[in-house]
Image (spheres, rainbow, N blue to C red):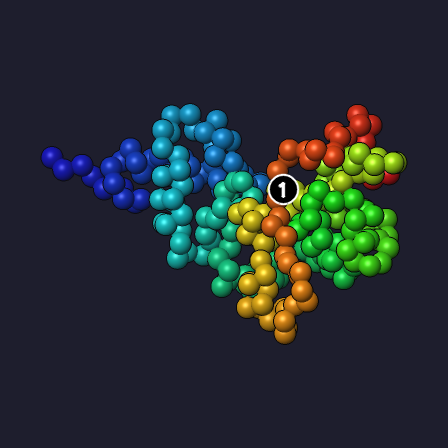
């Protein structure tokens, strides 16, 4: 007798596995890593394949399964985002100074306040960094081995999630910026866009944060 086909295709065992994975992802309040999913679904032996299957199933639906930061989450399909405008909570827009500071941190991390100011050419208000820390997009990484031991800043998985980036290397490079019309003409000699990184490994000139480091000093 032929094996019955389920809603998800394939045999009933495959359909049940996808249903369980779907339920866990829908119930999650934040993106779930494959490790977290494996802990919830220990019986699943081929989780990456199941995720890709579920991603394909939802590819043309109102919600899509997307990979953000180092996890997976359901998100409203981009072409339907305007329908959600009435449901959104009004949020304060970041100032230009905050956006510039966030971009510098994203591309140049780990970076200190003094290094941010050197790149921007102007002083950075403490409130600007406080806002970025409060949003959860920026974190304290460590302390630079310099007089005063200034803290270094880096981005967080929440930053990747907010901007729908699978990894920090998905930030636009020089060619992308030119293609988007954000860089006009010929950049000055020596101009380049750094290759961003956001791993937890401290640089050779960084020390771990002190036990009482809870805010920038």
Q: Nearer the viewer, residue 71 or 90?
A: 71
> Which residue carries the number 1 mark?
198
Q: Position of residue 22 (x, y in %)?
A: 43, 40
Q: Is residue 7 visible?
A: yes
Residue extending farthest to the left is 1
10 Å crowding of disc 1: few (<14), some (14-19), many (20+): some
Quadrant where the C terminus sits is top right
Q: Nearer the viewer, residue 150 or 62?
A: 150
Q: Residue at x 25, y 41 (%)?
A: 10
Quadrant where the N terminus sits is top left
Res. 38 image quadrant = top left
Q: Is residue 162 visible?
A: no
Q: Position of residue 198 (x, y in %)?
A: 63, 42
Q: Nearer the viewer, residue 131 or 124?
A: 124
Circle 1: element type: loop
**Image height check: is 80 above or below 104?**
below
Q: Position of residue 33 (x, y in %)?
A: 51, 36
Side of 183 where 73 appears, left or right: left
Q: Residue at x 87, y 36 (%)?
A: 147
Side of 187 where 44 appears, left or right: left
**Image height check: is 167 above or below 211?**
below
Badge count:
1
Side of 125 where 34 appears, left or right: left
Residue extending farthest to the front is 189
Q: Residue at x 83, y 48 (%)?
A: 114
Q: Position of residue 39 (x, y in %)?
A: 48, 26
Q: Residue at x 74, y 58 (%)?
A: 100
């Amino acid at each position: 007798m032929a094996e019955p086909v389920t809603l998800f295709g394939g045999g009933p065992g495959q359909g049940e596995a996808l249903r369980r994975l779907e339920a866990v992802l829908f119930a999650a309040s934040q993106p779930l890593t494959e490790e977290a999913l494996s802990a919830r679904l220990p019986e699943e032996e081929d989780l990456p394949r199941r995720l890709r299957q579920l991603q394909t199933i939802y590819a043309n639906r109102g919600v899509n399964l997307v990979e953000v930061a180092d996890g997976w989450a359901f998100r409203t399909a981009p072409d339907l985002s305007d329908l959600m405008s009435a449901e959104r909570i009004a949020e304060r827009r970041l100032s230009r100074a905050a956006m510039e500071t966030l971009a510098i941190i994203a591309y140049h991390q780990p970076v200190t306040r003094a290094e941010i100011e050197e790149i921007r050419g102007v002083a950075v208000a403490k409130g600007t960094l406080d806002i970025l820390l409060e949003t959860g997009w920026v974190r304290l990484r460590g302390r630079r081995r310099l007089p005063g031991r200034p803290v270094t800043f880096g981005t967080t998985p929440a930053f990747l999630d907010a901007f729908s980036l699978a990894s920090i290397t998905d930030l636009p490079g020089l060619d992308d910026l030119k293609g988007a019309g954000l860089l006009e003409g010929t950049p000055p000699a020596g101009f380049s866009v750094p290759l961003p990184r956001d791993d937890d490994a401290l640089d050779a000139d960084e020390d771990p944060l002190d036990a009482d480091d809870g805010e920038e000093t």
